[in-house]
Amino acid sequence: MKKSKRMGNNAIFFLLLVLSVLFLVPIIIVFINSFKSRIYISNEPLKLPTAETFVGLENYINGITSSDFFSAFLRSLFITVVSVILIVLFASMAAWYIVRSNSKITKGIYYMLVFSMIVPFQMVMYTMTYVTNRANLDNVLGITLVYLGFGAGLSVFMLCGFIKSIPLEIEEAAMIDGATPIQSFFTVVFPMLKPTAITVAILNTMWIWNDYLLPYLVLGSDKKTIPVAIQLAMQGAYGSTDYGGFMAMLVLAIVPIIIFYIFCQKYIIKGVVAGAVKG
């Protein structure tokens, strides 16, 4: 029995290893091609750079110059940070009120938020674009409110599962000591939400940082985020594409989020398990 269990564990390990390699291969190919000239990227995309094909940092310099990368980077950073703060703060407050109120109205709100998770973005993008333009939300600050709306569904769903595990008596004890409901939430409940709140922050950070369609529709080509800036700058006339600069900018765009994920990945598993098991 121990032998069969060991074989099963080895098989699972081998499967996970294969999946890891499959996920890493595209990133490795992008990194390799970021140091090759355009013609060799098209003709020999899987070959390592040689003395003939290696161009050093030329693709990175051209890409940064043509895409105004640093301005787009700061814009993406601002939008991501502010949006994630708003999502974590308001989603946690909404989840707490939904769980503690437990009325028909809050249940209806909860199910509408859950339903928003399965609605395809393509169904609402035209209406969303019209509303954001009329409400003057087509700017770097206004788009954070749009992200709050789209990110609230999954965030509230995860946070509700964890809040159900928090005993109501803890909050009642704080209120007996003179705390208001808001003070009870921020001093008692919110610190206990740390595992799930960090998970919500990580998942939304990865989504918002890499999002292309929503910033393109809301902000247009004037206030570009990193994905939009890369696409517009590297696309030349008559459909030609500077693949060298494109690959270099992709590397610069994904490195920050990969580093962020590596340092925070343990919180994702911890937060998901806490919300699923305890809820």
Image (cartoon, grey):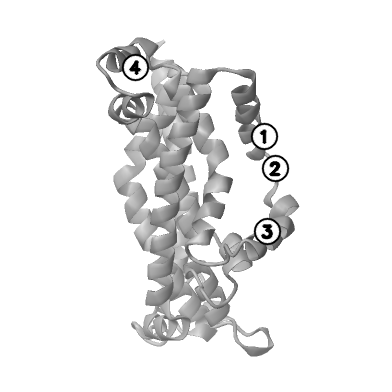
Question: Distance between the Cα atoms at labels 3 and 1?
Answer: 21 Å
Question: Distance between the Cα atoms at labels 2 and 4?
Answer: 35 Å
Q: Tell me the SS state at disc 1.
A: helix
Q: Which residue is mark 4?
A: 171
For residue 20, say whether it is visible. Answer: no
Q: Which residue is mark 2?
A: 119
* Camera-side residue of 112 and 18: 112
Q: Residues within 10 Å of mark 2 (few under 14, many from 20)?
A: few
**Dot 1 amino acid type:** Phe
Residue 12 placement, left or right of 106 = left
Nearer to us: label 2 or label 3:
3
Question: Distance between the Cα atoms at labels 4 and 1?
Answer: 30 Å
Count of numbered marks: 4
For residue 222, above or below residue 11: below
* Residue 115 circle label: 1
**Dot 2 amino acid type:** Val
Q: Which residue is mark 3?
A: 131
Dots 2 and 1: beta carbons under 8 Å? yes
Residue 116 placement, left or right of 156 = right
Question: Distance between the Cα atoms at labels 2 and 1?
Answer: 7 Å
* Camera-side residue of 174 and 197: 174
Q: Residues within 10 Å of mark 3 (few under 14, many from 20)?
A: some
Which comes before the other along the chain, label 3 or label 1?
1
Residue 57, picture quadrant: bottom left
Q: Residue at x 36, y 48 (%)?
A: 261
Residue 82, picture quadrant: bottom left
